[in-house]
Amino acid sequence: MDQSGLPFDDVRRLISGLEPLQHEFWQFGEPGEQGLFLIDQDRKHRVPSRPLLVLFAGAHAVEAEIMGDSSANWAMEQVSNICSGDSPINRKCEMLGFGFKVFDLALELPVGNISREAAMDEKTCTGTIAFGMEAIAGGADLLCIGSIAQRACFSNTALMHMLGIPITAAFYGKSDKPLADLNDKIGKIMSLHQHEGRDALELMRRLGGRETAAIFGAVLAARTQGIPVVLEGQAAFAAVSVLHSLNPIATRHCVLAGSASVTNQVGNALGLPFHSSFERELSYGESVLELAQLATGSNSIQMPH
């Protein structure tokens, strides 16, 4: 990105200057068929030759305080297992022929406690967006994006609500805390940051994690490079919601994958196709088998309504 005045200026300029897609990346089956297919510019079904899974790992101070544990330690352990090749997701990617990248986004330094302050300043948020844009360098013809961020429900839920995206308690994920307590805490977080209005980038830097900002950058870079994207997980859904709020045509290359209770909420709100064959909560990268099926034709894709 070019350098200009305020850190967000270049991001806004890039997004506002996007042109409509020259051709659609995803096509629904003919009447009587089910499924969604990855297609080329001639509208022919194609199988990706360079699919890539990218995971971004982040940590949140507010989660550790409220839930009484360290999400950073958990995320560090997951990243370490992946880097050593001992994680099941490594074997899945190898079996399916997926490239695989994982990025540690300063796990030792969680973003600010959003119950008291902004998660990031504008410079940090913009730098993380830029990092996400660079993270997909090297080439891909299908990009699958998720996150490694345990218990990030406060950040993502508050951000989605502030963007005006209607979501239910299913978006929170698993928790041993009473639902009323979670809702009360999220309500207080939203009250603290509501004076910022609904400027999407400002909300993301105040409420989002580094993984959300990095995914935002990766999705934006894929859009400028004409790469179709499949997204999974809370942080990815929050990131694409921010991008959609800024310019809806910036997300037309995306589909959503994950548990039905979550993907249908976000997919319908954003008008994006979604893959929701699982009723259970998915672990990071667990839907990679489903993502592979998306590229070749799946019978569990639903149109937003």
Image (cartoon, rainbow, N blue to C red):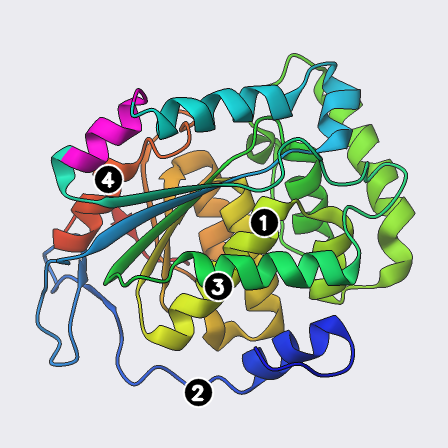
Assign the C terminus to one quadrant of the image: bottom left
Q: Reading the chain from its start, which is encountered first: label 2 or label 3?
A: 2
Q: What kind of residue is marked 1?
A: Thr
**In the shown orientation, is residue 55 left or right of residue 216?**
left
Q: Give the magenta range.
A: 86-94
Residue 24 in which image quadrant: bottom left
Residue 30 image offset from top left, x and y in percent: 11, 65
Residue contact at pointers 4 and 1, CB within 8 angstroms:
no
Q: Is residue 279 visible?
A: no
* Label 4 to label 2: alpha-carbon separation: 30 Å
Task: Give the labeled residue for mark 1.
Answer: 212
* Label 3 to label 1: alpha-carbon separation: 12 Å
Q: Which mark is residue 149?
A: none
Task: Give the labeled residue for mark 2.
Answer: 19
Q: What kind of residue is marked 4?
A: Glu
Residue 87 on the magenta span: yes
Q: Reading the chain from its start, which is encountered first: label 3 or label 1?
A: 3
Q: Reading the chain from its start, which is encountered first: label 4 or label 1?
A: 1
Which-is-in-front pick, marks 2 and 3?
3
Residue at screen point 29% across, 25% down? 85
Q: Which mark is residue 133?
A: 3
Residue at screen point 57% across, 35% down? 171
Q: Which mark is residue 290?
A: 4
